Image (tube, helix red, strand yellow):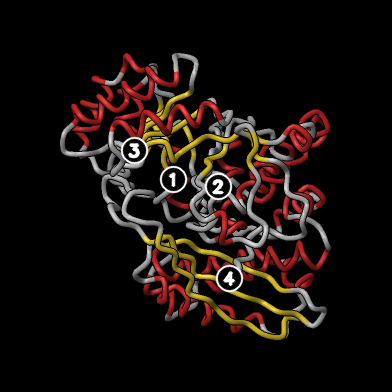
Amino acid sequence: MITSVSTRDARYDIGDQAGSDAIHVDPTYSYAATLLDDDSGCAGTGLAFTLGEGNDLVCKGAAFLAESLKGRDIEDLMADFGAFQNRLSNEQQFRWLGPHKGVVHLALASMTNACWDLWAKSRGVPLWKLLLDLEPEQLVNTIDFSYLEDELTREQALALLRKQSPSRVNREGVLARGYPGYDTSIGWFNYSDDQVRENVKKSVAAGFTAMKLKVGGPDMDRDLRRVAIVRETAGDAAVLMVDANQQWTLPRALEFGRRSREFNLFWIEEPTHPDDILGHQTLSKSYAPHTKVAAGEHVPNRIIFKNYLQSEALGFCQVDAVRVAGISEFLAVSLMARQRSIPVVPHVGDMGQIHQHLVLFNHIVLGHEALMLEHIPHLKTRFVHPCYVEKGVYRTPQEPGASSDLLP
């Protein structure tokens, strides 16, 4: 039984260079953490990610929502968590502040992720093992399918899970091999050209074969020069992506797509405003077949993801479990993406701690391709069990839970 709930406003100064992009020039990596204790001695930690200011507001929201967990048994709670999450997301007064986005939705993410972490710990298994062990009916019971019925019903989700089940044994080798990572830290926006070049050399030496560069400045020639530096230094065989962090207008994003074709970009990430679904649709058509659009870091909920998928407005789905309403909503989006054969390559506001579990589920249970997972090491020393990346590969975590416990 859950006996106590609390929150923690955890903020980490990472300096004025690391983490910088075209919009967020001086971020403070922060977690609004929900902490759950039960009478068996287990403690769950749930994370939502922010960049500093407002983190306290998310904590207040999570504390409000988490009060409803007191006295609940975690097994009973998770047996019908989709319905429970639906009720919380539609709390009559709190919902007005969203609905299903912003502070209130981040608060729901923090609380939801704490429940999943506690559930895995109470069973003594890593989150990935819990997800792999759940029967299809148990899994879909954790998901809120409301507003998705025109795209994905509960019955369709069950059918998808059952269809993939016979072949999952063929994909379990990833547990021993590890899941491929890609390096986001080679080219933060504030880094000089020389620093980018040296970072690429270090990344290649560390075993990474894929990397991402921040673009989106007022001088597109600078962006293209830096792309050329990365391509030249990493070599033609390297997988190269760029991320504009929503900075461009649609005409500018179209221009970059035309001017960058020679660099063989794997994707162009967040090329324009995240609410402009039709703009992303236009870009997807324009970029094809040379490259694809990646988006999802700032897409707040499963309904907007549904619209993106139905509009064929993205080539890579970057749903983030510390941005949408936690692991449960991540699962809903991942199921929809799988149904439309769109790869899921999560954004990692959690620094890959939780998502290293979720991508294993995606690959083994849903049959998503094991492409790669973003790696950002700047908060590695802040976690009790930091993710372990060796030779560019995430090694499978073995500790019980979702790897989300923060050090004091």
Give the label on residue 296, or none.
Answer: 1
Q: CA distance from mark 4 to mark 3?
A: 31 Å
Question: Marks 2 and 1: in contact by CB < 8 Å?
Answer: yes
- Element assignment for label 4: helix
Per the model, the C-alpha gap separating discs 3 and 1 is 16 Å
Q: How far separated are the C-alphas under marks 4 and 1?
A: 21 Å
Q: Are marks 4 and 3 in contact (CB under 8 Å)?
A: no
Could you tell me the amino acid type at mark 2?
Answer: Val
The Cα atoms of the two marked residues, 1 and 2, are separated by: 10 Å
Left or right of 196? Residue 333 is right
Q: Which numbered disc, 3 or 1, marks the residue that appears first in the sequence?
A: 3
**Residue 312 in sight from this viewpoint:** no
The residue tagged 4 is 111
Circle 3 sits on which residue? 214
Residue at the location (62% across, 75% down)? 35
Earlier-in-chain disc, 4 versus 2 = 4
The crowd level at tag 4 (other Cα within 10 Å; few <14, some 14-19, many 20+) is many
Kind of element beneath mark 1: loop
Residue type pointed to by label 1: Gly
Residue 36 can be seen in this image: yes
Instruction: Report the residue marked by disc 2.
Output: 333
Label 2 crowding class (10 Å Cα cut-off): few <14, some 14-19, many 20+? many
- Nearest to N terminus: mark 1 or mark 2: 1
Q: Amino acid at mark 3?
A: Lys
Whole-percent x and y of residue 379?
51, 56
Residue drawn at 37 percent across, 32 percent down? 242
Percent across and percent down for residue 360 are: 69, 41
Eye-nearest disc, 4 or 2? 4
Q: Secondary structure at mark 2?
A: helix
